[in-house]
Image: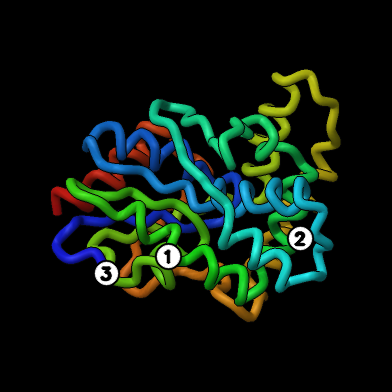
Amino acid sequence: MSGNIPIMTLDGPAGAGKGTVSRAIANKLGWHYLDSGAIYRSLAVAVLDAGVALDDMDGIVNVANKMDLSFGSGDTPSVMLNGKIITDRITTETCGHITSQIAANGQVRQALLQKQREFCRSPGLVADGRDMGTVVFPEAQYKVFLTASAEERAQRRFKQLKEKGIDVSLIGLAKEIEERDRRDMERSVAPLKMADGAVLVDSSDMSIDDVIAQCLALLEA
């Protein structure tokens, strides 16, 4: 699949800081970056735009096979779907809810598998998601399972939404995060779990810089 191209995978639950850490590492190393969550979220937007029912898996797979997806570069890469920028749309709660439903289906995951593997190009790849080290790139040389307590992740999300002027309940966010964790860990296809050979990093009481340094230490080791 990847030949001699180095790969670092960062798996873990929502809100653990995978995206921020992965982008920083990719920028520092000059490697490519795969945000697998953005691929699934983009599919959710494509499904909405196509008017396909969420229980029509054949229809969703058809949309997945046809969607033209590309990512820009930078700290917050733009996401383009079928010629239109959808960066803001993939971050909505509605999109997240739809994503968690369709991502649990084996047909959908298989349809998007090759799209994700195509991101593996020289000089290297940093990939973040739920099953990067277990399913998509099991051959990766460097694997991290990045987590944080549900309370800490809820606090982070609460702060993000407040800064955007969105009024939310901290208790409600914590419940949503715990429910999403449960769905991700209990799904029958590619459940969220620590990959063989992965290093566990708990970011609950760590700064982003400390997490990045710990991940980069794997390369030096």
Give the camera-side residue of 5 and 81.
81
Q: Which residue matches tag 2?
A: 179
Disc 1 from disc 3: Cα separation: 10 Å
Give the amino acid type for the residue marked by disc 1 in the picture.
Gln
Residue 20, placed above or below residue 106: above
Which percent across, then down, holds residue 179?
A: 76, 60
Q: Quadrant of the N terminus?
A: bottom left
Q: Residues within 10 Å of mark 3 (few under 14, many from 20)?
A: few
Q: Is residue 209 above or below residue 188?
A: above
Under mark 2, the amino acid is: Glu
- The x, y position of residue 208, in whole percent, is 42, 34
| Residue under label 3 | 1
Crowding at label 1, few (<14), some or many (≥20) Cα neighbours within 10 Å?
few
Image point (52%, 61%), residue name = 130
Report which residue position mark 1 lands on: 114
In space, the residues marked 3 and 2 are separated at their CA atoms by 34 Å
Q: Secondary structure at mark 3?
A: loop
Taking 187 as reference, is 24 left or right? left
Q: Residue at x 80, y 59 (%)?
A: 52
Q: Which numbered mark, 1 or 2, is in the foreground of this view?
A: 1
